[in-house]
Amino acid sequence: MELNPTIADPRLQLIATARYFYQQGWMVGTAGNLSARLADGSFWITASGKSKGELLLNDFVLISPDGKIEASATQVIPSAETAIHQLVYRLFPESLACYHIHSIESNLVSRLVEGDSLLLPPLEMLKGLGVWQENPYCVMPIFANHFQVAQIAADIEQRFAVTPPQISALLIRDHGFTVWACSLEAARNYIELLDYIFRYMVAAIRLGINI
Ligand SMILES: CSCCC(=O)C(=O)COP(=O)(O)O
Ligand SMILES: [Zn+2]
């Protein structure tokens, strides 16, 4: 049996996941974007500017591995952050899903440090992100939020060429975070796990607990 088979058409699953993320308050006001890769390397991505709580099948654009539009309904354009998804699939070819959300806590924690890395607390939850160590030292990369998304993508490519990330995730300061995984289910889990970790960090600071 094939492991992690690509789904012929992942759009229904992406619609359900976007609705769930929207209900969590992670994709309000059209924020965020989701994509899933097909066997031929192309990927379906949410169209730009759509409410993620009520996506329809036509609210997706099929993008070729080199970034060209392969299929779309009329009057929809691909997510403004397509370049980041395209880069993720190129850098991590085993990935089948890439999800980007805007949560309040991810923006708050991105301001905790001035540098470009956020140390995550050594919580058990890190195991869900693939970090199986005693007292793990796990940092998450933070990128500047340029107006030009192509610049964010260029920064990610440059940094990951030198320093591959410890976990399949990155933060964009004051913007949100992006995860990638080898299945749609795993990508959703990564979003939930990081949301938990960021909420924990914010709650600990509020309580004056040193993490
Ligand atoms: C209101 S969110 C601003 C744009 C953004 O950061 C985002 O995630 C959504 O952009 P898209 O083009 O994918 O709708
Ligand atoms: Zn965004």
Image: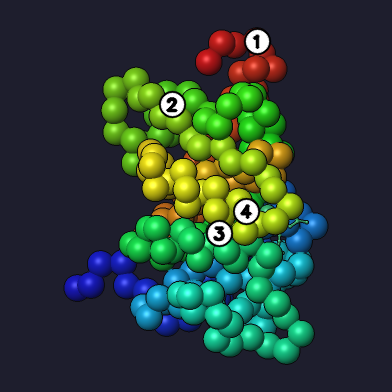
Instruction: Say what secondary structure mark 2 lies in.
Output: loop
| Mark linked to residue 123 | 2
Question: 10 Å neighbourhood of mark 4: few (<14), some, or many (≥20)?
Answer: some
- Give the residue type that dot 3 points to: Ile
Question: 10 Å neighbourhood of mark 3: few (<14), some, or many (≥20)?
Answer: many
Q: Nearer the viewer, mark 3 or mark 4?
A: 4
Residue pointed to by mark 4: 151
Q: Is mark 3 within 8 Å of ligand 2?
A: no
Q: Nearer the viewer, mark 3 or mark 2?
A: 3
Mark 1 and mark 3: Cα distance apart in space: 36 Å
Q: How many marks?
A: 4
Q: Residue at x 80, y 57 (%)?
A: 29
Residue pointed to by mark 3: 84
Q: Nearer the viewer, mark 1 or mark 3?
A: 3
Q: Please say whether residue 103 is visible from this viewpoint.
A: no
Mark 1 or mark 4, which is nearer the start of the sequence?
4
Please state the horizontal and vertical placement of residue 165, each as a whole percent of the image: 41, 41
Mark 3 or mark 1, which is nearer the start of the sequence?
3
| Mark linked to residue 54 | none
Mark 3 and mark 4: Cα distance apart in space: 10 Å
- Give the residue type that dot 4 points to: Gln
Mark 2 and mark 4: Cα distance apart in space: 33 Å
